[in-house]
Image: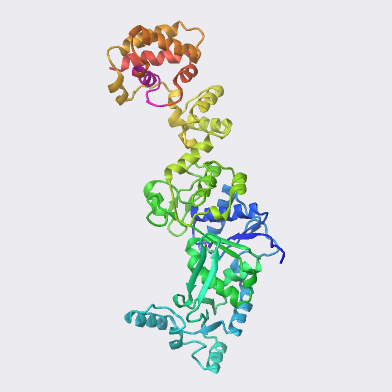
Amino acid sequence: MTERKVRVRFAPSPTGALHIGGVRTALYNYLFAKKHGGDFILRIEDTDQGRFVPGAEQYIIESLKWVGIEPNEGVGFGEGIYAPYKQSERKAMYKQYVDQLLNDGYAYYAFDTAEELDAMRERLKASNVDSKYDAITRTTMINSLTLPEDETKRRLENGDAYVVRIKLPRKEEVKFHDEIRGWVHVNTSTMDDKVLYKSDGMPTYHMANIVDDYSMQITHVIRGEEWLPSAPLHVLLYRYLGWESIMPKFAHLPLLLKPDGNGKLSKRDGDKLGFPVFPLEWKDPNTGEVSSGYKQSGYLPEAVINLLAFLGWNPGTHQELFTLPELVEAFTLDRVSKHGAKFDQNKAKWYNQQYIRKVDNKILVEELQKQLEFYNIKAVEKYIEKVCALVKEKISFVKELWDYSNYFFVEPSVYDETVIKKRWNEKSPLVLNDLIELLIGTTNFTHANIETAYNHALDRNEVTSKDFLQMFRVCLTGVAGGPPIFEMAELFGKESTINRLENAKKRIK
Ligand code: GLU
């Protein structure tokens, strides 16, 4: 058999905002497709119309665009020869396969009402038996296996509501190989006769998913762990439909866990701990509730891609920073973990910080200019540019520029109390006096000359730099941490530096 071209799909249901776990699934599919020169498809699985949420489909498309992993085929990305890519628009395609299963005895009609199903469940619960519609219970229910043939026919002709269920063998081992988990064995005695199709003409998720993967020539199904329990049913459907020889390979990705590892990462965790779980801001059309997104929180798409790649996968080396093409190169399914991946908010921030360092200074300058405008502060562009270059290393988010750089534009009037308590003593004003005097005499105001003056002032007063350096910083900026201090003073310039020291001398007691 000739090798089939790799074709993978991301198949979300438009039931709300896309969770970052979903973005990670899309990413792994993308990486796998690109690595193998294959196709990456976006299919919208909207057979469950009751759970449809307006705007969700567009949100999914926008999210994939923002992180830069665009499908080369599918809803919103150019319809290829397998169109349409939205299941509600493919409705007519499923019936023939449902009929095939019915004709071949792998499926049957069931007419039970909701009340009858409830009664069955109650009955079984009372006798402590698993309450599922299966090879045993179906013999006591109203379906084409228990009704006389002409009665089934009559009901169908009469237009009675029905569902089609898969007819599972009572006890049979289903075995399949998962690319991440290895061999998976499940006995049909633990499964139920899932509904495949309803009389309103709509297939259920399972039926549509299998038919679409088959007809779209999907070679690998890479999806979240929550779909692992459905996989044995899918394997049987491939077999019963006669498609087993071209069944896609399965790879079930590990769960994204809460930071403490206790269960699946949810929106509530993000709200509680202060980080987004959605790529973009999302306004719930039902409740009006707005949830923040990575984009709006100041994350760069490159950072989001990089951090998501590492939630469940690692390259097997110490390298942590990867561009998208580098990820494509390095990604393999056998390095995807079987175990849940804990979301780490600090690591997420760290990734963003790394990518901020790579951002073109021009972009930072524009952003800081906006922030300065907000405070009505005017400054020369060259100066702003130098400030950005100095604080770039310190910030995790572009929006923090002002927080880290305000003292470059406004001389401080309050000073860090902790440092003062620890470091200010009777010698401090004397050092400052000498330093001011030496700086006044410094003609070439470079960081090297400032440092020389500083060391002289310390020597004259027999004070060590360890005892005074942080105080010096607080006198200049008001705060305890920041960029290299002599470079910073050079940037403030002679006049402002001396002014800051004079003020500090007067104000600090
Ligand atoms: N529609 C399913 C979802 O919402 C797709 C599962 C699969 O990829 O088979 O995730």
Q: Relative to 89, is 449 on the left or the right?
A: left
**x, y (%) of residue 248?**
61, 66
Q: Residue 508 falls in which quadrant of the image?
A: top left
- Residue 486 part of the magenta-drawn span: no
Residue 246 visible at all: yes
Q: State the colouring used for the structure image.
A: rainbow
Give above or below for 79 relative to 191.
Answer: above
The residue located at (44%, 20%) in the rendering is 485
Give above or below for 92 relative to 312.
Answer: below
- Total numbered labels placed on residues in the image: 0
The residue located at (49%, 87%) in the rendering is 143
Q: Residue 385 falls in which quadrant of the image?
A: top right
The segment highlighted magenta reads 467-481
Query: Could you say which is closer to the camera, residue 144 or residue 199?
Result: 144
The quarter in which the C terminus is drawn is top left
Query: Could you say which is closer to the camera, residue 341 or residue 58?
Result: 341
**x, y (%) of residue 208?**
58, 70
- Residue 477 part of the magenta-drawn span: yes
The quarter in which the N terminus is drawn is bottom right
Dominant secondary-structure state across the stretch colored magenta: helix
**x, y (%) of residue 339?**
45, 56
* Residue found at the very far top of the displayed protein: 441
Residue 55 visible at all: no
Give above or below for 508 relative to 164.
Answer: above
The residue located at (47%, 28%) in the rendering is 376
Q: Relative to 443, is 478 on the left or the right?
A: left
**x, y (%) of residue 158?**
55, 89
